[in-house]
Amino acid sequence: MEKICISTVSSTNFLPGTLVLIHSFLKHNPWFKGDIIIIYDDLDATQKQQFGIFQNVVFKKTEDDLLLKIGQLCWNRRKLLPQRRHFYSIEAFGMEGYDRLLFFDSDMLVTGDLNQVVKLPGELLACSDSHYERLDEVRDRTTFERISANSVANQSKVLTKTFNSGFMAVGKSYLNNKTYEALKQLIHINIFSEITTHNTDQVVLNLLFDGMVTYLPATYNLILSQSPELILKNKLNRDEIKVLHFTGKYKPWIQSSKLDELLNDPYYEGFIRLWESEWKEVKKKLEGQ
């Protein structure tokens, strides 16, 4: 039997999101009996205790060497400092001993069965980083900006297709120290001094795995801000969605005027209320600890 685990990155600010992510995954995937690996740097004992509502939780503190690489980069690129924890996803690739690892961002909500993903061939499965991806656009390898494919004279200077790192299914051949070290080496000022987008770990992952990704339908990483057009364009039923991704600054567990604005939109409200209903179930479990 294959040894499968799930992993995510958590922090004090993302604790509610992490608890809901795990709860929703287990709720819709009763077949899963593996380890739940929490990558962290600032969770205290009381916060860790909340994960006691789940079984097989393993806490993995971010390695000092990875923190050093991130720190050196942020010292030279101060604008990346608030996003430094995005790089912690790389820690997942150093987790040896598993046949398949499912990585999730902690601002995701699982709404369907993911057993099919585990069974699919491919050592790295993920979704495109743009649901509106145009065939005539590619990403510049140096800046990570989207550019016209027609303007490219040298194909080695572009990434023809790129993925969002929010949900990844990683196979055994990439879960090792060799992959982990290769990813860490890409966290370097020589690379990020030229990057003009807001991306962090996504740059590193796409550079290393260019042309090596098996792409999943957008339903496995449905980005909330892009979902209305996607669903209307493809006549996508909400029941087909497997994983919902609350990307960006505004999260359903953080009160803000923007969140209030989204709750007044009939489309967004449904997704946010869905997250809130899962959070109520989590709180009930926490009260019963």
Image: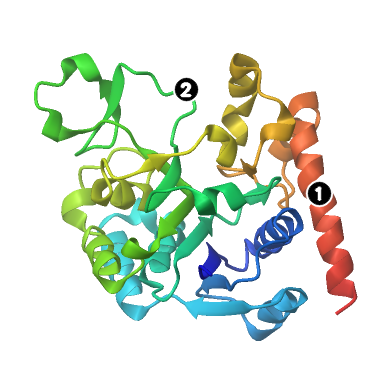
Q: Secondary structure at mark 2?
A: loop
Name which residue type carries label 1.
Glu
Circle 2 residues within 10 Å: few <14, some 14–19, many ≥20: few
User: Mark 2 and 1 residues: CB-CB less than 8 Å, in contact?
Assistant: no
Name which residue type carries label 2.
Tyr
Question: How far apart are the two marked residues, 2 and 1, measured between alpha carbons?
Answer: 28 Å
Q: Nearer the viewer, residue 147 or 74?
A: 147
Q: What residue is drawn where x is 70% and y is 75%?
A: 51
Q: Nearer the viewer, residue 156 or 11?
A: 156
Q: What residue is drawn where x is 60% and y is 31%?
A: 225
User: Dividing the image into 4 quarters, which one contains the C terminus?
Assistant: bottom right
Q: Which residue is mark 2?
A: 132
Whole-percent x and y of residue 129? 43, 36
Circle 1 residues within 10 Å: few <14, some 14–19, many ≥20: some
Q: Name the outermost residue toward the front.
A: 1
Determine which quarter of the picture holds residue 180.
bottom left
Which mark, residue 276?
Answer: 1
On screen, residue 152 versus residue 222, left or right, reads: left
Residue 189 visible in rendering: yes
Whole-percent x and y of residue 74? 32, 60
